[in-house]
């Protein structure tokens, strides 16, 4: 097996077809079932954060896939899939998140009654579940523990310091030990940990998989700059595996031969050639309205990250490409397929006014 990690590797052909993007469902072993308790009323969502039919009450048990995955929208928080359904619950409603106690705090059952005699000391780390509640006294509280009602004033707690879903212990199992990789300096390891060594890890990432085994990803060792290969350790529990490309870039697909436009809304002339219909992942980095003079209206366009693309027709009998330079394609002519969903950086009215100003100059 190749030992060099793949954190920064990308697949490109002529700069034409895109980086090989593997979404959360690709190249993964079928998840097993696990039963967990919902600690905070939870809505069901799809992977892009839109609510779907389904709501799960606090302190009820649900059957889930045991492999949590990150939602496909910022901040890419972890979620569990309901077994057998296309529904996802935020892991913060199940596993909770960790916060620091900023000042000594009591635990409450209501706004006027304490749940018990406990005093949470300043500096203590506790787990809270879901969003805060607004009590009758106008103050907000986070739920802790259960099943009886236990709350702590939100103002007495810090921001989230870590996710319980994204932290676990791993043990080195490889006979020759595990390499500790510092990706800032190099893609090869500079030191090794002996077999049996344990580490706390707080993040897992995959940028396309090892060339011999796409199941391999890397764990980040908490509080350090080092990473471990998943093939060289055994984790106490499964963590969501983040896909670097999917969380940093946006990808479209050309489902038909597509015209390319310039920033001023004029169509590019490639002697009858267009970008060819193709199944690859193509990077885009901007979504905006552009005034199209020929149509006398503003339309939504994606800005293409690449410059060279396969052409719809060959001019010499072989495979041909076109260089689109600073190119744009209409949103309606392509399909968004993976990565970060873009929002328009302007409005149709702003694009219209900008075009008018250029005309009058």
Image (tube, rainbow, N blue to C red):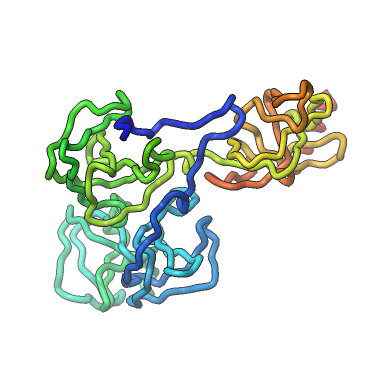
Q: Quadrant of residue 291?
A: top right
Residue located at (63% from left, 42% from top): 279
Q: Left of 322 or right of it: where is 205?
A: left
Question: What is the count of numbered marks?
Answer: 0
**Vertical relation: 32 (above or below) 201:** below
Residue located at (35% from left, 71% from top): 38
- Can residue 121 be seen here? The reply is yes
Viewport quadrant of the N terminus = top left
Front one among 285 and 84: 84
Q: Left of 296 or right of it: where is 213?
A: left
- Can residue 357 be seen here? The reply is no
- Seen as rendered, the residue at the extreme top is 316
- Seen as rendered, the residue at the extreme front is 317
Residue located at (46% from left, 69% from top): 84
Q: Position of residue 73 (x, y in %)?
A: 49, 50
Q: Position of residue 49 (x, y in %)?
A: 51, 58
Q: Left of 203 or right of it: where is 317?
A: right
Viewport quadrant of the C terminus = top right
């Amino acid at each position: 097996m190749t030992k060099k990690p793949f954190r920064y590797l990308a697949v490109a052909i002529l700069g034409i077809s895109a980086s090989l993007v593997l979404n959360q469902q690709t190249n993964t072993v079928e998840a097993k079932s696990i039963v967990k308790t919902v600690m905070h009323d939870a809505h069901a969502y799809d992977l892009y954060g839109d609510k779907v039919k389904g709501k799960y009450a606090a302190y009820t048990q649900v059957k889930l896939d045991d492999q949590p995955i990150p939602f496909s929208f910022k901040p890419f928080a972890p979620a569990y899939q309901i077994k057998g359904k296309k529904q996802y619950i935020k892991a913060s409603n199940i596993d909770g998140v960790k916060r620091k106690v900023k000042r000594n705090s009591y635990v409450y059952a209501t706004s006027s009654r304490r749940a018990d005699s406990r005093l949470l000391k300043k500096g203590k780390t506790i787990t809270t579940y879901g969003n805060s509640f607004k009590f009758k006294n106008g103050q907000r509280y986070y739920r802790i523990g259960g099943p009886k009602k236990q709350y702590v004033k939100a103002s007495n707690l810090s921001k989230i310091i870590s996710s319980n879903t994204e932290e676990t212990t791993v043990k080195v199992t490889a006979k020759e030990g595990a390499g500790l990789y510092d990706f800032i300096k190099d893609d090869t390891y500079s030191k090794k940990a002996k077999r049996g060594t344990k580490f706390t890890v707080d993040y897992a990432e995959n940028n396309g998989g090892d060339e011999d085994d796409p199941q391999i990803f890397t764990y980040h060792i908490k509080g350090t700059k080092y990473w471990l290969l998943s093939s060289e350790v055994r984790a106490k529990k499964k963590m969501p595996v983040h896909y670097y490309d999917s969380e940093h870039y946006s990808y479209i697909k050309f489902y038909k031969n597509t015209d390319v436009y310039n920033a001023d809304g004029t169509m590019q002339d490639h002697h009858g050639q267009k970008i060819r219909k193709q199944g690859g992942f193509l990077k885009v980095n901007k979504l905006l309205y552009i005034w199209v003079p020929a149509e006398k209206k503003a339309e939504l366009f994606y800005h293409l990250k690449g410059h060279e693309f396969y052409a719809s027709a060959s001019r010499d009998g072989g495979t041909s490409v076109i260089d689109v330079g600073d190119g744009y394609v209409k949103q309606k002519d392509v399909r968004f397929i993976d990565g970060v969903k873009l929002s328009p950086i302007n409005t149709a009215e702003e694009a219209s006014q900008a075009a008018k100003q250029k005309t009058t100059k």
